[in-house]
Image: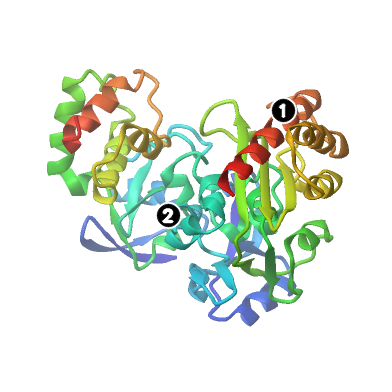
Amino acid sequence: MFTILDLVQPDTIEEAYRVLTGGNGTILGGCAFLRLGSQKIGAAIDLSKLNLNYIKEQDDYIEIGAMATFRDIETSPILNLYFNGVLPKSVGNIIGVQFRSIVTAGATVYSKYGFSDLITALLSLDTEVELHNGGRMPLDVFLNKSNEKDILTGIFIKKNKRMAVYQNLRNSASDYAILNVAVSNINDQWLIVVGARPQRAEIAQKASEALSKGVNIENIEHVSNMAAEELSFGTNLRGSAEYRKAMCRVLVKRAITEVLQCR
Amino acid sequence: MQIEFAVNDKKVTVEAGIDELLADTLRDYGMLSIRKGCDTSCCGLCTVWLDGKPILSCSVLSFRANGKSITTIEGVQREAEEFAKILAAEGADQCGFCSPGFIMTVLAMKNELKNPSDEEIRHYLTGNLCRCTGYMGHLRAVKKYLGVV
């Protein structure tokens, strides 16, 4: 069982950052996974007072506050309207409504969870994250950065006509994904993202570039194989590396085909 | 720490540890309908409403309910009894251990979805597990209760 020794509920992000970097502070997200471990937290920092629970449509971006829940994403009219609804679709099968009402977008992205469905979908869009100290940066840059103590305050998705599709494979409907895939297209530029490998989501760069040169039936098959070859896969209790690699070909092919139907 | 919230429309102040979970705080307060069944945040037995939204009370820290409104099945007894009778009549209620959480989710769904399809009902109730039945009785009961048969 986890233990919290002290609780801090800052009124400003600056105060939260001071506590975080001043000693043994830990930012609390939705806390859905906290009880699964035996973590001992010196100073738990609760961001509830910072009004970070929002999804806003700006002129150029859709902004998701760090404390917005998966249920907020799932039911957001804005997010259902853009990108073929890929973000709501990516989180809609995670355990149940009650669970999705707890877990937060910020904690999931900041933690860089390998099994994350949301990160895979976000990576297929033009997404940036904002860190209090580190500033704003593309999501893929953030994911590849070494972990530093910081506070993720928001997720920014460029508003454009990108069409995206999310595919996943699960042992049961509400289990963690064995593998998840998001594929998107805008102006014939493609992005292929594969997550839950079980390592965190990554863009299949070579396959994305190859697909962006032109799409046809043979090409889809070839590109799907390329994606499976260029990414690495691991084994855990949900599936072996070989199985994931084989399924990657199938899911990428399905996702590309589905994106083509959306255009 | 002291936590003030409304439980079933009654304002109360309780003492809870900063790492205490809402399910434990509410049970200590006497809301014994709340059960913890899985330890992995997936069974839905501990479902209560926090400001009207269904949540897993086993996974929410109690202090986060400070200043908020909590509804347990004790607070919606009339609606719960009405649905529970249909649940029993459809053979969907055997040991009954999962019923309070399941009923809270069904009532939340009734508030949120208008004329849901079979697929929407199943999707909304994915987070409530029952180990006695095969869910078909549940689906029949929910559809009868919602009048979408």
Tag 1 subunit: A
- The residue that label 1 is drawn on is A247
**Whole-percent x and y of residue A59?**
55, 77
Q: Is residue B78 left or right of residue B23?
A: left
Residue B13 sits in which quadrant?
bottom left
**Whole-percent x and y of residue B85?**
14, 28
Return the residue nearer the eye: A149 or A6: A149
Residue at the location (64% across, 81% down)? A14
| Mark positioned earlier in the residue sequence (1 or 2) | 2
**Whole-percent x and y of residue A62?**
56, 68
* Quarter of the image with the C terminus of chain B in it: top left
**Whole-percent x and y of residue A43?**
63, 66
Residue at the location (17% across, 34% down)? B145
**Kind of residue at disc 2:** Thr
Q: Residues within 10 Å of mark 1 (few under 14, many from 20)?
A: some
Tag 2 subunit: A
**Kind of residue at disc 1:** Met
Indicate whether A12 appears above or below A147.
below
SS type, badge 2: helix
SS type, badge 1: helix
Return the residue nearer the eye: B42 or A74: A74
* Quarter of the image with the N terminus of chain B in it: bottom left
Indicate whether B27 appears above or below B62.
above
Residue A179 sits in which quadrant?
top right
Q: Are marks 1 and 2 in contact (CB under 8 Å)?
A: no
Disc 1 to disc 2, how far (Cα)? 29 Å
Return the residue nearer the eye: B118 or A15: B118
Residue A20 sits in which quadrant?
bottom right
Residue at the location (59% across, 25% down)? A171
Q: Are marks 1 and 2 on the same chain?
A: yes
- The residue that label 2 is drawn on is A75
Q: Residues within 10 Å of mark 2 (few under 14, many from 20)?
A: few
